[in-house]
Amino acid sequence: MKELLVISGKGGTGKTTIVGAFAGLAKDSFPCETTVLADCDVDAADLHLILKPSVRRTNEFFGLKKATIDPAKCDNCGECAKVCRFDAIAMHEESIKIEPVSCEGCAVCFHICPSQAINMKDVIAGHWFVSDTIYGPLVHAKLGVAEENSGKLVMEVRREARRIAETRGSRLIICDGPPGVGCPVISSMSGVDLALIVTEPTIAGVHDMERLYTLANGFDVEVVVCINKYDLDYKISRDIREFCRTHDIDMVGRIPFDEEVVKALVKGEPIISPDLTSGKSESPAANATRQLWAEILNRLSL
C-alpha cells in the first residue's frame, strides 16, 4: 500500500483540484480495486465539494480539554483570573466566568485554584466522517469554529483512511494535504511514500514552496513538484525549475492555465471524470494532469 500526499506551501495553488482529478484517474487505473481518499485539510476542507460524498458514518473529535467552573465550590477569589495568560477568565456580575472560546486548555487555573472549583473537561472540537463517493471511500473532517489541535484531527483522518485501505486491500491512498508548513502539515506528512508539491508561478508560491521542501526534507520524505498555471509567468516558472534542478528535485508536471478548469469547479465537478478514458476531447489542463498522474504512478511503482 502506497500513500500519496498532495500539498502546497500556500492556499489557492490548485492542490484540491488536482486531487479531485487524481480520484477519477485512479478509478480508471485500478478498475478492480478501491482507492481510498483522505482530506487532511481539516481547517478548511473542500474536497467534498467536488467529490459529492454520501456520509456513511459521523464521529466526534475531542481536542484540547477546557476549563469549567463548579459554582458550588467557587468562592470568587479571583486567583484563576490572575494567572490566565489568555484573558479567558474574568468577573461577571460578581461571579467568575470562563470564556470557552478564549480558553487554551493550559490547566494553570486548575492547578492554582484553592477551592478545587475548576475542572478540565473534554470538549467536542469537531467531527470526522467516513463517506462514499463514486471514486471510492473518502475520510474527511470539519474542525469547529475557533477550535485548535487540528494536527491531532489530521492523524485521526489518516488512521481511518489506512484502516479502510488495509481492510479493502487497496494499493493507494491519496491525501489532500493542508497548506502551509504548520502542525497539520507535519501530521499529514509523516510516513507518506511520496509528497507532490503543487506550486504556482508567483513570488509567494515560490517562497512557500521552498519552505515546504525544507520541511519535507527534514522528514526524509521524497518530494516531486508540479507547477500549476505555469504559463501565467514564464520567468518565475523558470526560477522554480532552477530551484528544483539545484536541489535535485524532479519536476513531474506543468499544468497550463485553462478556463475549462474554472467552469468545472463552478459546476462542482472534477476536471477529469472517471469515464473519460481516451482523453481526446479533454482540455489542455486535463491532458497535462493525465501526464502528471502517469509520472506519479511510475514514481510509486504502481
Image: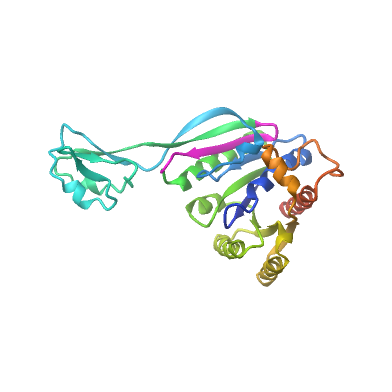
- Based on the displayed image, in which of its 4 quarters is residue 263 positioned? top right
Q: Is residue 277 left or right of residue 207?
A: right
Q: Is residue 146 left or right of residue 201?
A: left
At 37% from the left and 43% from the top, the residue drawn is 64
Q: Is residue 15 left or right of residue 76?
A: right
Counting from the top left corner in percent of width and height, residue 244 is at 68, 67
At 14% from the left and 38% from the top, the residue drawn is 94
Counting from the top left corner in percent of width and height, residue 80 is at 20, 47
Quarter of the image with the N terminus is: top right
Magenta stretch encompasses residue 176: no
Counting from the top left corner in percent of width and height, residue 262 is at 70, 45
298 or 234, which is in the foreground? 234
At 44% from the left and 39% from the top, the residue drawn is 144
Quick check: 7 above or below 236?
A: above
Quick check: 146 above or below 194?
A: above
Any part of residue 45 in sight: yes
Counting from the top left corner in percent of width and height, residue 211 is at 55, 64
Any part of residue 302 in sight: no
Provide the residue span drawn in magenta: 133-146
99 or 242, which is in the foreground? 99
The chosen color scheme is rainbow
